[in-house]
């Protein structure tokens, strides 16, 4: 018999699950007042920017899966592209062999804000004021921060106080990091959203106003501030000060887009994920690698099988996944390919990266991944969890928080699920644009993202 202190939850007007209770209760308030799942998701997402700033921000990114009641599952891609000037030659010309893990050189075109606005415009029912009111309230009047916010700030305190002073203004007011039990506010962020609402107030109807907000982000005061920030020399994990490549043209020409999800049918369910740009199909590959009969649940053989399957799928991710490349996903998920790959799982744990050859193609691992994997067998060369950070071991600049007692680093990210009374569903994973990634844009109250830290200069 299993015992748990967590009851089975049920409701008549919907359900919300997220990584922070204030985001969940804000989204629930929207559902209770008659809003749909998309309205609730947008409201909750903007609260996550306020209460989990060490894990996500408006200038980060978000993959969104949406399942309208009775309709087809769709993906909304909130992953911005690399700026036009972010070329291999540009980084090499700066003497870099790795994109810095922090600072403006790692900034992609921000994607999260536009994706949430597109979701609200096309599928929501509530106004811009309705969905932003919760985030504005918590940013303006304060909230009790989780311990991790203060712990993260402490890991970068010296950097904030000596270099990223705009971040110190927000996250070290009076020299004190946010701490549980004491209200913490971000007035600059609240002022940004209030100005956005003021500037779009005369735009017309609901959809026209959301479109006006997208334009303010792309070409208005927000875009101007983001470009200015990218042009400020900023000390990053290379140990040097660099300016970024983000321009007004980059911001003005990018938009979030809808896509068909990657899918795999398993055990009577169709599992949906965003495309290879999100790394999501790794889970589909792990399902495809499972044999018809599984070992006893929880047994050593069961755990061994899942771990080794994960390694094989991750190796294929390293060799084959990309955002614009021709990713052979059909072959990677085919029965024939995974039957052959399944035979590679033996009785011992495997330390090597072993990508396969889908469709007879020759796998290619980047040089950095090969070197990192060889240097520390069994260690994921791309880091563990979120926030990830690309940095030299000799870098004097902090990267992801080091807050565990044993000295290891672990990150995390945000998540948000909503289902409404009509059966509409949303599942989203906001990330990037975290407080330790870039200095706070002083005019806006949030930093640029660093998703280009995940790219290789090859």
Image (cartoon, rainbow, N blue to C red):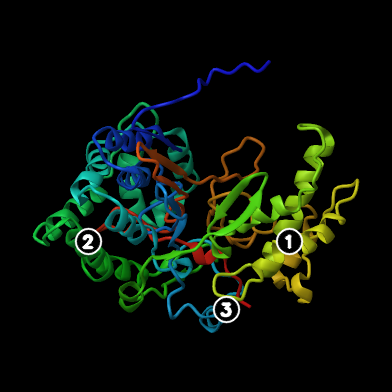
Which of the 4 quarters of the picture holds residue 30?
top left
Above or below for 364 versus 211:
below
Sequence-wise first label, 3 or 1 = 3
Q: Residues within 10 Å of mark 3 (few under 14, many from 20)?
A: few
Front one among 444 and 69: 69
- What residue would you read off at disc 2? 213
Tag shown at residue 315: 1
Residue 176 percent location from the top left of the image: 36, 38
Sequence-wise first label, 2 or 3 = 3
Q: CA distance from mark 3 to mark 1?
A: 29 Å
Tag nearer the camera, 2 or 3 = 2
Q: Residues within 10 Å of mark 1 (few under 14, many from 20)?
A: many
Tag shown at residue 95: 3
Which of the 4 quarters of the picture holds residue 254?
bottom left
In the image: residue 21, left or right of residue 400: left
Front one among 211 and 124: 124
Whether residue 379 is visible to the viewer of this picture, yes or no, is no
Q: Residue at x 58, y 18 (%)?
A: 4
Q: Secondary structure at mark 3?
A: loop
Above or below for 347 versus 455:
above
Furthest residue toward left: 202
Front one among 92 and 39: 39
């Amino acid at each position: 018999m299993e015992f748990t202190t967590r009851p089975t939850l049920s409701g008549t007007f919907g359900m919300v699950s997220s990584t922070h209770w204030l985001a969940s209760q804000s989204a629930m308030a929207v559902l209770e007042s008659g809003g749909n799942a998309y309205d609730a998701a947008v409201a909750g997402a903007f609260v996550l920017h306020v209460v989990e700033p060490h894990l996500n921000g408006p200038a980060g990114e978000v993959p969104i899966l949406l399942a309208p009641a009775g309709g087809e599952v769709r993906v909304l891609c909130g992953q911005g592209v690399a700026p036009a000037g972010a070329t291999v030659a540009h980084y090499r010309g700066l003497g870099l062999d790795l994109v810095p893990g922090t600072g403006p050189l790692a900034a992609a075109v921000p994607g999260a804000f536009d994706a949430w606005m597109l979701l609200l415009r096309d599928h929501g029912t509530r106004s811009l004021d309705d969905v932003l009111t919760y985030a504005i309230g918590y940013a303006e009047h304060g909230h009790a921060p989780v311990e991790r916010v203060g712990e993260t700030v402490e890991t970068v305190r010296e950097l904030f106080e000596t270099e990223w002073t705009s971040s110190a203004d927000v996250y070290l007011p009076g020299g004190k990091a946010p701490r549980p039990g004491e209200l913490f506010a971000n007035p600059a962020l609240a002022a940004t959203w209030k100005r956005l609402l003021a500037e779009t107030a005369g735009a017309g109807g609901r959809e026209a106003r959301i479109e006006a907000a997208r334009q303010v982000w792309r070409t208005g005061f927000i875009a101007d501030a983001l470009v200015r920030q990218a042009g400020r020399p900023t000390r990053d994990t290379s140990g040097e000060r660099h300016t970024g490549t983000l321009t007004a043209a980059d911001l003005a020409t990018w938009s979030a887009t809808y896509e068909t999800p990657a899918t795999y049918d398993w055990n009577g369910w169709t599992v949906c994920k965003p495309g290879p740009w999100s790394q999501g199909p790794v889970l589909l590959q792990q399902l495809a690698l499972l044999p018809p009969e599984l070992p006893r649940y929880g047994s050593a053989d069961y755990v061994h099988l899942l771990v080794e399957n994960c390694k094989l799928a991750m190796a294929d991710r390293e060799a084959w996944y990309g955002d614009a490349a021709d990713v052979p996903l059909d072959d990677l998920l085919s029965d024939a390919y995974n039957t052959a790959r399944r035979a590679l799982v033996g009785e011992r744990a495997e330390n090597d990266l072993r990508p396969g050859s889908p469709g007879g193609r020759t796998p290619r691992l980047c040089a950095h991944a090969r070197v990192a994997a060889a240097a520390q067998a069994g260690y994921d060369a791309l880091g563990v969890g979120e926030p990830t950070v690309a940095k030299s071991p000799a870098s004097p600049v902090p990267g992801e928080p080091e807050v565990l007692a044993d000295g290891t680093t672990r990150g995390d990210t945000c998540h948000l699920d909503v289902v409404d009374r009509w059966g509409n569903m949303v599942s989203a994973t906001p990330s990037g644009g975290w407080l330790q990634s870039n200095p706070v844009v002083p005019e806006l109250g949030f930093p640029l993202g660093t998703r280009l830290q995940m790219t290789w200069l090859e």
